[in-house]
Image: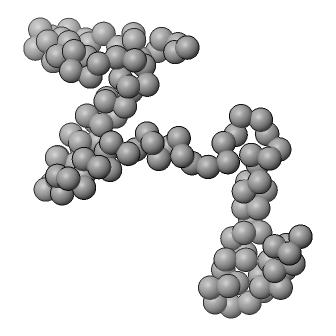
Amino acid sequence: MIAYRLITIYEDKQGDAGKLARRLRRELAYLLLFLQEGGVAPTNNHAERMLRFGVLWRKRSLGSINDKGDRWVERIMSLRQTCRIRGRRTYPVLVDTMNSFFSGGPPNISWIQEKTN
């Protein structure tokens, strides 16, 4: 295969071509893993779709202005995505959690560990 030959030619070179060749040599087995193992996707499309809402939100809102805002966004986006994966609506989960907080009890998180179909 021509790719292997090019890696061999360039991996001892200095500069960007050599760095790329060395990196490809290190990661080559993983780059083709989807051909050898069933159930491994050839793209990261699933991961990109999971992040899309947060990326679009940040683009529209221009992000947050401090670390505290960043932590809130991370957590609320994580909650939203978990609810989406588990087939739950985010707002009722958030309301139940806040009610538990203000009443001094622990929130019901058993739904997170339920198996999905």
Q: Is residue 115 left or right of residue 61?
A: right
Quadrant containing the N terminus in the rendered view: bottom right
Q: Residue furthest bottom?
A: 14
**Position in image of residue 46 (x %, y %):** 53, 41
Residue at x 48%, y 11% (from the top left corner): 114
Q: Residue furthest left?
A: 102
Residue at x 81%, y 73% (from the top left corner): 3
Q: Does 56 sit above or below residue 50? A: below
Q: Does 45 sit above or below residue 101? A: below
Q: Is residue 92 left or right of residue 26?
A: left
**Position in image of residue 7 (x %, y %):** 80, 77
Colour scheme in use: one colour
The answer to which image quadrant residue 19 occupies is bottom right
**Position in image of residue 95 (x %, y %):** 17, 16
Quadrant containing the C terminus in the rendered view: top right
Q: Can residue 37 be seen from the camera position used here?
A: yes
